[in-house]
Image (cartoon, rainbow, N blue to C red):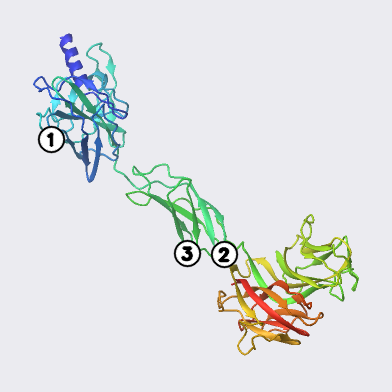
Amino acid sequence: MKSSKVLVRRFHLLVAALLAATMLVPGFGSIASADTPVPIPLTPLTLTVQTGSQTYTYPASNSGGFGTGPTIPAVTDGQAATISVEVPGGSIARVEARQCKNVPVNNQNDFEPFLTNKCSTVQLGSGSYVPGVGAYADSGPKAPGTTQVDLSFVFGLGTAPAIQDPFDGSTIPGFSCLAGDTCRLVVNISIASGGGSDNYLSFPIQLSAPATTPGKPGTPTAVAGNGSATLTWTPPASDGGSPILDYTATSSAGDFTCTDVTVPLECVVTGLTNGQTYTFTIKARNAVGFGPPSDSSNPVTPVDDCEGFVGVTPTRLLDTRSGPVPPGYPVGQRLSGPGEIVLDVTGVGPVPANATAVVLNVTSTQASSASGFVTVYPDGVARPTASNLNLNPGQNLPNLVTVKVGASGNVRLYTNTGAVHLIADVVGYYAPAAGDRFEGVTPTRLLDTRSAPVPPGYPAGQRLSGPGEIVLDVTGVGPVPADATAVILNVTSTQASSASGFVTVYPDGVARPTASNLNLNPGQNLPNLVVVKVGATGNVRLYTNTGAVHLIADVVGYYR
């Protein structure tokens, strides 16, 4: 009797061999004694599994064994399934299916449940029952020439009882295969010829409860930005049995959202109002829908941390010839080098106390040394190896300087040698959460009194005579939009007739300031960069005090 059982065991180890979750192992033998010998085909098979509304189809080559199939989630008790296999004509085919424990099932040792109890003895429904082996669905061997083998059954979840090994009498523990447990449906496909080998394909179908919405994500961490907040969080402990498709963050006010699907999980909520406080929650979404929201994030208040430019009517902050000068500095005394002037620029004139940088038109005059230079830099830092003006005796040399303000609210003007008078006119400043943003443009000529363009009514080819000025429209002209608040011009003087002449560029509609942008010199072409606020009319004015001069103005950028 024992010999008979061993024979039965060996037969089933050959025809039902498989690995439940890892690989296919080619076996040897035949499906039934009546099989007709035919060559084993080398063409691929196509396997289709349908459970509920989900259909999974994939090819598998039976040349040298088969690959591992997919995992199909959310199979429930009483759910119907159909397995269809397309096989080459001339082969003998058989499909078997069982529910097995969620452990590797070795096709040489474990497939027969009464010997290992790794596979359930629960009847699968429409499958056949083989005494002494256990319950499983079996299509039975199909005759050569069959092109498709179908196996339909109903999952029967339950508990496999503890059993006694019929050979040594030991007790093999049972296992549960219920909704929510991680059991598998093991499918075995045998392709055989009567005198050749069987090939086996196995794949797992995960047995679990129906998918639900995901769990609650981790509490997000929020970091404020300019009109925005950056959020980071951790995924929920459970995806609900279905992969998470994306996450949505929602603000506590205004219903602003952002979505992310990548790891690490992070997204930026935009459109927020600076100065308003927000908290945020996160919801995860899978194929079923959105899960519950996370706990609220830490509160954050977005702020405009960008620094904008504010143009002002040119205002003189320093003139060592006559004043203004810093407290204690002798009026009328040239700055001798090496030496420097500490100039307070914040909270002075039109510059507010919170300005972070100023734009100055710095002019040197009455320099005594051709090797002298001037460096303008923030107070409180080491003096840089840079210069803003290179001096020349007998010449008035201006240059536009943008300089960061030191922590003290001051800047420093240094000269290395000789002596020189310095003049500094502020034309604008930068401050947090204020002002306008810069837009650079391709340099475009707006004025050239030598030929054109010139303002309407101004005679082309005529020098500007002083005292006199030109009103120049700069907004809505060329690349400058109508809402520009300031423009950056490269202004050049040429063919000047008077060495005592100068040019002032200022907003239309305000009193002309006591400031200059260019100091003229006959026989020289003198350029300087000018940042000038636009008047309410959209215009700026170019003034010269004496003599006659041709003026050229090219716009290189604007603020809006």
Picture quarter containing residue 72?
top left
Residues under numbered marks 2 and 1 in contact, where contact means CB atoms less than 8 Å apart: no
Q: Nearer the viewer, mark 2 or mark 1?
A: 1
Q: CA distance from mark 2 to mark 1?
A: 69 Å
Q: Position of residue 170 (x, y in %)?
A: 27, 14
| Amino acid at circle 1 | Thr
> Which one is nearer the viewer's eye here, 536 or 117?
536
Q: Say above or below: 17 vs 222.
A: above
Q: Nearer the viewer, mark 1 or mark 3?
A: 1
**Are there few (<14), some (14-19), or many (20+) residues within 10 Å of tag 2?**
some
**Are there few (<14), some (14-19), or many (20+) residues within 10 Å of tag 1?**
some
Mark 3 lies on a secondary structure that is loop
| Amino acid at circle 2 | Asn
- Which residue in the structure is indicated by mark 2? 274
Q: Position of residue 66 (x, y in %)?
A: 26, 30
Q: CA distance from mark 2 to mark 3?
A: 13 Å
- Which residue in the structure is indicated by mark 3? 254
Q: Residue at x 28, y 40 (%)?
A: 74
- Which residue in the structure is indicated by mark 1? 147
Mark 1 lies on a secondary structure that is loop
Q: Nearer the viewer, mark 2 or mark 3?
A: 2
Sequence-first tag of 2 and 1: 1
Picture quarter containing residue 102?
top left
Q: Position of residue 76 (x, y in %)?
A: 25, 39
Q: Say above or below: 532 vs 237.
A: below
Q: CA distance from mark 1 to mark 3?
A: 62 Å
Position of residue 511 in the picture relative to residue 46 (left or right): right
